[in-house]
Image (cartoon, rainbow, N blue to C red):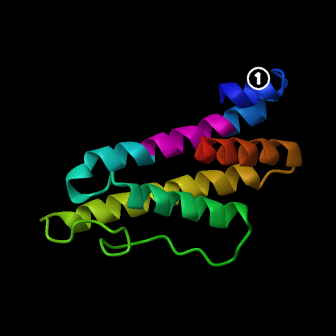
Amino acid sequence: MSYLFYKTKGKMSETEIKNINAVSKSIKDFEAVQVQYSKFGANDSEVTCILHELIEILLSNKDEMNIPSNSDEWALYREVEGVDTAASALTEAARHVINIIEDTMNTENGADAEAVVTYLREYFTD
């Protein structure tokens, strides 16, 4: 967020900062789930790419978004016992990220929503 804050010369509204912090926290929470279930392949780049793709679908206003719900869709290691628990945790965490982003974008103030979109685009291109 510091780059975006710098870029806007510190002129972000409290709502913009609150929204960006909420989105950032949800992504960090997703990443914590990835680490927690890393023995199932949850911390591999495939899973990270899936989350990025889901967010890109959301930002592109495409109607069709299917959040993965099983180990195959998350590209996890199927042969490891407990992989279904890992898949469920990733699905729940991804839904949370998407819900938070949707909530922050469904604001009456377009500038607040734009700040979130800008933050996400910068976050995933760094």
Up the image or down, 71 lies above or below 92; here it is: below
The residue located at (34%, 49%) in the rendering is 34
Q: Residue furthest front?
A: 126
Q: Is residue 104 magenta?
A: no
Q: Is residue 27 magenta?
A: yes
- Number of marks drawn: 1
In the image: residue 58, left or right of residue 45: right
- Range shown magenta: 20-29
Up the image or down, 49 lies above or below 78; here it is: above
Q: Is residue 108 visible?
A: yes
Is 1 or 98 nearer to us in this picture?
1
Residue identified by numbered label 1 = 6
Q: Residue 124, position in %: x, y?
A: 59, 47
Up the image or down, 16 lies above or below 81; here it is: above
Up the image or down, 100 lies above or below 11; here it is: below
Screen quadrant of the N terminus? top right
Q: Residue 105, position in %: x, y?
A: 74, 53
User: Please, what secondary structure does the residue beneath circle 1 have?
Assistant: helix
The residue located at (30%, 44%) in the rendering is 35
The residue located at (38%, 74%) in the rendering is 73
